[in-house]
Image: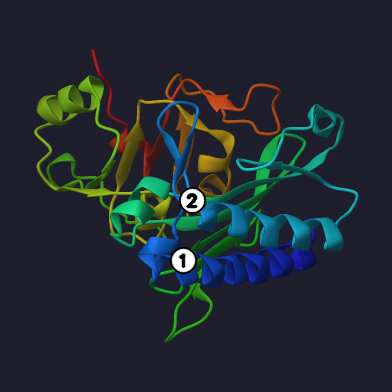
């Protein structure tokens, strides 16, 4: 599958959206925070990023469907083999906290599988990207095209775990206690998957529900870096579904040897 154009357009759109996000981030009074679905924050940066990305994708690929967190859902996308899955600002809570741990996520699903992923980190300028069968890569301000590879560690006592900084849960506490894991870091947004992809952690478990746009780009990147990505019941995560809720949770591990199981 040749996804050269899709990847190029998504990378450019993600970076442009990141610049728009930083314009707001650097002027805290301009965030214009509102709330949706109860306690889910929405800022002017989410909206600006979404418009840049959606416009770019529609112009380049008018025949593809788009599922975005900030767009009204059009279920006609279910009839399309190709669907971009977009989170224009993943980690809005982290954005509001001003801790830098937020990203721009753009993925492409083909026949319900994530085949391309782009994650841009506006604060650092890091750009993670991957396409099916082509590997995963990282561009930074100092280096471009660095190939990503997961850690080879399979010693349970040496495992490094990355966890959500905003979404703790009882199952995670039990997992840490069972395996006596003390080497962990809390982080926001899809950065957690990126840490595994570049070999700086081995395990990421997420028991709480997420949405398609939270995981689609991350999944392609971590899998192309050599990681295993599954729902908590060990079934594949599919995309462009009628119900976009990832209700089963998921895990990312660098090796099958590092699969952690709760009794």
Q: Are marks 1 and 2 in contact (CB under 8 Å)?
A: yes
Answer above or below: position of 149 versus 87.
below
Q: Nearer the viewer, residue 91 or 113?
A: 91
Q: Confirm whether residue 43 shows in the render.
A: yes
Of residues 55 and 115, which is closer to you in this image? 55
Q: Which quadrant: the C terminus?
A: top left
In terms of image quadrants, where is residue 70?
A: top right
Q: Position of residue 212 (x, y in %)?
A: 58, 35
Q: Is residue 83 left or right of residue 176?
A: right
Residue 219 falls left or right of residue 193: right
**Can I make out residue 224 in this image?**
no
- As helix, strand or loop, the secondary structure at mark 2 comes to loop
Q: Which element type, helix, strand or loop, lies under badge 1?
A: helix
Q: Position of residue 88 (x, y in %)?
A: 57, 53
Q: Is residue 178 left or right of residue 85?
A: left
What residue is pinned by disc 1? 24
Name which quarter of the figure residue 176 lies in: top left
The image quarter containing residue 100 is bottom left
Alpha carbon distance from label 1 to label 2: 9 Å
Mark 2 crowdedness (10 Å alpha carbons): few <14, some 14-19, many ≥20: many
- The residue at which mark 2 appears reads as 43
* Furthest residue toward bottom: 142
Identify the residue shown where x is 61% and y is 27%: 244
Q: Identify the residue shown where x is 30% and y is 48%.
A: 202
Numbered disc total: 2
Q: Position of residue 174 (x, y in %)?
A: 16, 22
């Amino acid at each position: 599958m040749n996804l050269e154009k899709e990847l190029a357009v998504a990378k450019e759109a993600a970076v442009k959206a990141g610049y728009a996000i930083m314009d707001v981030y650097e002027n805290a009074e301009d965030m214009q925070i509102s709330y949706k679905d109860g306690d889910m924050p929405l800022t002017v940066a989410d909206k600006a990023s979404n418009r840049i990305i959606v416009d770019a994708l529609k112009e380049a690929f008018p025949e593809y469907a788009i599922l975005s967190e900030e767009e009204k859902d059009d279920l006609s996308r279910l009839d399309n083999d190709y669907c971009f899955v977009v989170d224009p600002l993943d980690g809005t809570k982290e954005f509001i906290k001003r801790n830098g741990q937020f990203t721009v996520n753009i993925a492409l699903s083909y026949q319900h599988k994530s085949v391309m992923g782009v994650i841009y980190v506006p604060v650092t300028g890091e750009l993670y990207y991957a396409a099916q069968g082509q590997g995963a890569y990282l561009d930074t301000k100092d280096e471009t095209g660095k190939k990503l590879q997961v850690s080879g560690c399979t010693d349970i006592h040496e495992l490094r775990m990355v966890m959500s900084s905003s979404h703790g849960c009882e199952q995670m506490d039990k997992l840490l206690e069972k395996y006596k894991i003390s080497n962990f870091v809390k982080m926001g947004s899809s950065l957690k998957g990126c840490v595994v992809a570049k070999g700086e952690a081995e395990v990421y478990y997420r028991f709480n529900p997420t949405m398609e746009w939270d995981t689609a780009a991350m999944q392609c990147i971590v899998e192309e870096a050599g990681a295993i990505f599954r729902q908590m019941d060990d079934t594949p995560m599919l995309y462009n579904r009628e119900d976009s809720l990832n209700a089963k949770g998921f895990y990312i591990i660098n090796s099958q040897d590092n699969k952690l199981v709760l009794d």
